[in-house]
Image (tube, coloured by chain):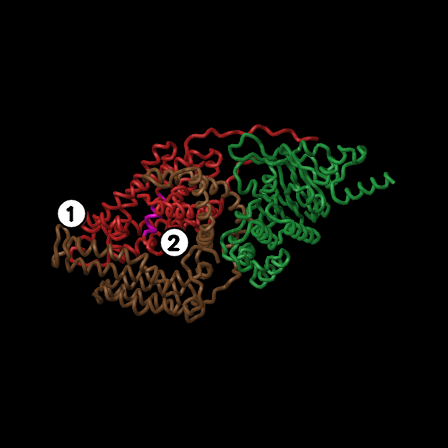
Chain colours: A brown, B red, C green
Amino acid sequence: MTTTTLYLERTSALHRLNPVTKLVALLSIILAVFAVPHWWIPIGIVVVVIVPAAVLGRVGGRLLRLFLILLLPLLVVLFIIQGLFYPDGSTVLWEWGLAQLTTEGLLFALTIGSRLTALVLGSLVFVLTTDPARLMSALTQVGMSPKIAYVISASLQIIPAFQARAQSILLAQQARGLAIVGSPLKRARALLPLLGPLILGMITDVDERSTAMEARAFGATPKPTSLIVVPDPLGERIARWVLFLSAIAVVVLVVVGVIA
Amino acid sequence: MSSTTPAAVDPNRTRNRIFVALGAAVIVATYLYLILAQPTELAEGGLGTSALIALAGYLIGAALIAVGAIHRLPTATLSLIPIAIVINIAVGQLAATLGLPVYLDSIGTVLVGVLAGPAAGAVTGALTNVIWGLTIGPIALPFAVTAVVIGVLAGYAARLGMFRRFYLAPVAGFVTGIVAALVSAPIAAFIFGGATSGGTGALVAAFQAFGNSLLASTTLQGLLSDPLDKTITFTVVVLILFALPGRLRSRFPFVRQYNVFGKVTPVAPAEPAAPKA
Amino acid sequence: MTDPSAPMIELEGVGFAYEDAERFTLANLDLRIDAGTVTGIVGASGAGKTTLAKTIAGFIPLNEGGTYRGTARVAGRVLAEGTLSEAAAAVGLVTQNPFNQISGARFTVREELAFGLENRSVPRDEMERRVAEVAARLRLEPLLDRSPYALSGGQMQLVAIASMVVMAPPVLVMDEPTSQLDPAGTRLVYDVLSTLSDGGTTVVIIEHKTELLHEHCDSIAVLAGGLIVQHGAPGAVLADDRLTTWGVGETRVTTAARLARERGLLPVERALPIGVDDAVDAFSALKGAAS
């Protein structure tokens, strides 16, 4: 399948799960992690749930690489900003000019950073192990609008074609001597002739694209059938509810003050 | 003889309107709660529930608006959206590759808002962030609400006639940028701790060093970059649309209904030749 | 409607001008096409062929703003009075650019072929059967599990045609269906269209390769100046000496024969051949005259 998503085709139990189950699990984890005000809860979930899931889904290596590219730089910046410049820090550990390393700042960075790690890594495991085609089918099966599935599926598939087109227009312009180095303004100028044809194409093609969709009876019935049916066993449906209700319970317990 | 515009009867019209209204209310309530109620709680140390409320409130609000809005869109508008999303992503990536100091990742969203209205703009914005999440990484997803706001405001700006003169569009862009900065500040503060990227992080640190609260710092940082970015985005969009033949622009029912590009005298086609016997 | 002699497609005084256009693209046009026939539509570029295709399919005026007049009936029904969905069920339209014809809603060719059937709530086992059948006819089996966007232009065009054929509409309108196909693919498509027409489907093809139309069509209609200026048997239409003034290319056989005649190789009094068979006849006659 040619799309630009992060999905990795593997054979694993995690890949076989109904995508809706994985999505509900992800949302439940995020909900719990953001509700409980302790940094060790998200870290614990990353260590006990997310990383083992990645290993089980045979995407551990890729997850590590994405962690290093996407998340680590943010975490470094976070600890610099909040560790050194936290506005409400009082317990100063070290000082240099305006920068104050405070216990409160470090704790704040740890809270935000651990949640962010759970959010990003959890989402990445979901995306890495979930075929977007299967995701769209499964979500449509549980009632998501076919219109949303259409827009997401079409976008994912047109991206490679457009990137190729953008690349070739850019090359053509370089061949004609248009600079893509120099001041930001100069470089930005290279964008305009690129955008023009892309947008013109979008507007001139839209009639034909919509005619093609109408000719295929898109939206003709509120209950279309489906060629591919994603299995959704009873066990998974129960598991989804249990996960979701547990997450809600955690949120409620935090709000009423049982967990503090 | 008839002039035709397809009209679809929508059985869920009321439900969809409620979704959109509820979504807008949730977003506004989330923002107000975060700026009004949180400073005291933050001062006591820790985050309280602000992160959860920022994440859940904004995501639920954005999702409600997107779901309510997409049902109102005819197929012709829907088939415009994937291309617009791809323009957002292709140009956004290119701007990053070229090392431009602006994001330029909402050109497609603004285009759709202007050509097809606020509902279409909202859907384009929300789903762009979903696509970012699936392709580049999930960091952009919490900001979906900002993309929705940009699409909606672009649509209303077009309705108000801000695209009738090329010099009015940048003003609309500037205002949109201010709103976008305000809306996204709580996400940058409570979910990312100000660390959305290296450059913006340095600014947030500087504002905090001078005694501003976290939320105030991310707001100030947003106000430095978003209005500029949206001014440029709206300018690019208006320039490109003005360069297009009027016939292409006026294909869109929204453009005709609200006279988005100013007065056009409707052309009556000359009488056709008589049929041959 | 029940009258078997009534034409399947009947346009009476149909005119259409696009929004803000200065002239009518179609002007008071009349066209009658019988059920179960294959009809070719030719005309210069810009003559309004695509507009005519959309009008037959009901997309004009249902999906296109502009000024519309006249009556267009398919199987006795005025499509303009119904919904777009009803029109799409009556007439299958394959548009020009296969890239835009791919829905994008599905990730494999197999599902892309089934997409229209899904939207018509066709049961799954029937869908599987029909998809397999059309894939076999257009030799798409090796591509079924690939992404429709990963295909070559020609393959994409075959998928676009197959995705409409699978819906089995009573009328099939195709706008330059073989523009990106190699000769083998082109033959495949025309064979399938012939089979469909034998089964009762009415086929309308916009095509500028007149050889193909001569070979496969029951009739050819010429569109010029927004009007059907000639409509009849392929041999008669393609032999019309006004053909080039309408901006329609003669067949290559005709061109070759004309050049041969200019060099004195063919007698002036003999009509120029159109198809390969006519050419063989002409050459045989020549041999007979020489001996």
Using the image, determine if residue C264 lies above or below residue B31: above
> In the figure, residue B51 lies in which quadrant?
bottom left
Tag 1's secondary structure?
loop
Residue matched to label 1:
B210
Is residue B30 visible from the viewing direction of this image? no
Neighbor class of circle 1 (other Cα within 10 Å; few <14, some 14-19, many 20+) is few
Q: Are marks 1 and 2 in contact (CB under 8 Å)?
A: no
Residue matched to label 2:
B130
Does residue B77 belong to the magenta stretch?
Answer: no
Is residue B244 visible from the viewing direction of this image? yes
Q: Which residues are magenta?
A: B143-152
Q: Could you tell me which chain the residue with mark 2 belongs to?
A: B
> In the figure, residue A50 lies in which quadrant?
bottom left
- Point out residue C60 in the picture as x, y percentages from the top left corner: 57, 41
What amino acid is found at the position of numbered circle 1 in the picture? Phe
Q: Residue at x 20, y 51 (%)?
A: B214
